[in-house]
């Protein structure tokens, strides 16, 4: 049972990987949590993810034993390869994260990760087909409103509803995400090719700002992801998506073209890459944000989900070990905003992202001063420490 008497129950909006991990962390602290998801079914979203030591150590703290299951379901990466679109190899780098930070670089299908996280929760706390529309704060509760006209009361509302968060819209009112100047395409398919040894990741680049990445995600599947600079963020008509990717990446070293050809057109997801400027505060009253709803970032460092796990761990622990809700949420904001801003800034810096906001632009520029190895130590040595009472 949570020590914080003001919080006995919570509602999580969104059964993405951030919401599910947060629900596991809250239950571990004795908080009665219910998860509401707008989708009618948890379907594969055609994506793969890379989990890093900070994310894996956090998941292990939340649900001991989970990393073994994830490694079995995914593919620990032993080598990363960088190639030019002509086929020329730029480098082949053995992956040393396991030796340095105690956990591997692990690639996994997004849907397997979601299934595994959901398997650690009672099925009856995940409510599908519940689209959150709005909320109203009262002194001792929050009233959450859904599209099916259902309303529910809770002690705490946690918006884990992604980059287009409805909870953030009401809480912060900061408008739509901003386009980062890149279009992306991605898919997960079964694919085998002798040029793609197991447990390796490939990034192939051109000098025109295009990139094609191929990841072994385990079980005979690969995740491919392509991106290119584009001033125009408009999407192709559905029936033209595959031919567009084929055209943009035509003539690239194999197996790029073979992979696109082998991907059923309906499995290719086309998206503009977007982010938002960091917030000064994620919490007001009895409502807070987590994961992409709080800190959507460009995926150059692969840290969106990894940092969402950190958010969930810390939020649950601050809630459980603080005297009251206000203190818990203040500590959560103080602890998380600084760290995630640095990661947002570093991700933006790698992507050569330009911002009008001078405060954040300065933070992005400061990131040039931290070298890669210092940054990796700071990032991957994240310690999901055990909180003591009334911390
Ligand atoms: C191409 C690409 C590659 C990436 N690679 C990596 C990587 O390698 N490693 C990494 O850590 N991160 C990566 N990321 C980022 C990562 O996918 C996100 O950071 C992560 O999915 C965020 O999780 P989330 O739960 O906060 O949000 P989401 O995954 O967006 O989940 C939000 C959930 O909320 C639901 N929802 C939305 N609105 C409502 C509503 N109104 N009511 C109810 N439910 C709602 C949605 O249906 C969804 O299930 C990548 C992203 C992209 C685009």
Image (cartoon, helix red, strand yellow):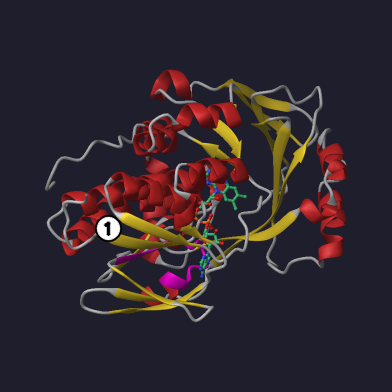
Q: Nearer the viewer, residue 353 or 26?
A: 26
The one nearer the camera, 389 or 336, is: 389
- Position of 35 relative to 118 (above/below): below
Q: Image quadrant of residue 243?
A: bottom right
Left or right relative to 107: residue 25: left
Q: Position of residue 68 (x, y in %)?
A: 49, 26
Of residues 296 and 124, the one nearer the viewer is: 124
- On screen, residue 51 versus residue 81, left or right, reads left
In the depicted structure, whether residue 359 falls above or below residue 58 = below
As for residue 162 lying within the magenta part, the answer is: yes
Q: Which residues are magenta?
A: 156-167
Left of 39 or right of it: where is 366? left
**In the rendered image of this protein, does residue 51 appear above or below residue 365?**
above
- Residue 310 image position (x, y, % from top left): 36, 45
Taking the spot 72% from the left edge, 22% from the top edge, the residue there is 197
Give the structural element (helix, strand or loop) at label 1: helix
Residue 83 lies, with reference to residue 45, above or below; the image says: above
Mark 1: C-beta under 8 Å from nearest atom of ligand 1: no
Q: Position of residue 329 (x, y in %)?
A: 24, 60
Is residue 314 on the magenta stretch?
A: no
Residue 315: image location, x then y, percent: 29, 52
Instruction: Provide the residue designation for mark 1.
Output: 333
Q: Nearer the viewer, residue 3 or 56?
A: 3
Q: Residue at x 39, y 65 (%)?
A: 358
Residue at 29 percent across and 53 percent down: it is 31
Kindly tell me whether residue 212 is visible in this rendering: no
Q: Would you call the spot at circle 1 few (<14 residues within 10 Å), some (14-19), or many (20 or more)?
A: many
Left or right of residue 175: residue 185: right
Residue positioned 15% across, 53% down in the render:
322
Determine if residue 78 is in view. Answer: yes
């Amino acid at each position: 049972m949570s020590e914080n008497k003001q919080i006995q129950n919570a509602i999580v909006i969104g059964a993405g990987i951030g919401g599910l991990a947060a629900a596991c962390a809250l239950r571990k602290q004795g908080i009665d949590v219910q998860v509401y998801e707008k989708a009618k079914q948890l379907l594969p979203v055609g994506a793969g993810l890379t989990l890093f030591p900070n994310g894996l150590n956090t998941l292990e703290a939340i649900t001991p034993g989970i990393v073994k299951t994830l490694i079995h379901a995914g593919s620990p990466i032993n080598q990363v390869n960088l190639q030019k679109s002509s086929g020329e190899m730029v480098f082949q780098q053995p992956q040393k994260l396991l030796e340095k930070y105690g956990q591997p670089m692990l690639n996994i299908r997004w849907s397997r990760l979601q299934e595994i996280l959901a398997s650690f929760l009672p099925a009856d706390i995940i409510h599908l087909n519940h689209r959150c529309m709005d909320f109203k704060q009262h002194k001792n509760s929050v009233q959450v409103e859904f599209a099916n006209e259902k309303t529910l009361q809770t002690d705490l509302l946690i918006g884990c509803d992604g980059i287009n968060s409805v909870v953030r819209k009401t809480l912060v009112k900061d408008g739509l995400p901003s386009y980062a100047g890149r279009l992306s395409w991605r898919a997960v398919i079964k694919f085998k090719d002798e040029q793609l040894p197991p447990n390796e990741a490939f990034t192939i680049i051109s000098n025109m700002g295009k990139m094609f990445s191929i990841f072994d995600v385990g079980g005979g599947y690969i995740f491919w992801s392509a991106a290119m600079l584009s001033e125009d963020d408009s999407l192709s008509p559905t029936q033209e998506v595959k031919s567009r990717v084929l055209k943009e990446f035509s003539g690239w070293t194999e197996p790029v073209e073979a992979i696109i050809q082998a991907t059923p057109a309906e499995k290719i997801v086309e998206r503009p890459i977007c982010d938002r400027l960091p917030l000064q505060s994620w919490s007001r009253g009895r409502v807070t944000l987590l994961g992409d709803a709080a800190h959507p970032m460009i995926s150059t460092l692969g840290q969106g989900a990894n940092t969402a796990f950190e958010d969930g761990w810390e939020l649950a622990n601050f809630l459980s070990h603080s005297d009251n809700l206000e203190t818990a949420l203040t500590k959560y904001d103080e602890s998380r905003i600084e760290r995630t801003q640095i990661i947002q800034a570093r991700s933006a810096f790698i992507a050569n992202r330009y911002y009008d906001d001078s405060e954040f632009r300065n933070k992005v520029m400061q990131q040039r001063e931290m070298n890669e190895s210092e940054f990796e130590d700071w990032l991957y040595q994240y310690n999901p420490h055990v909180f003591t009472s009334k911390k």
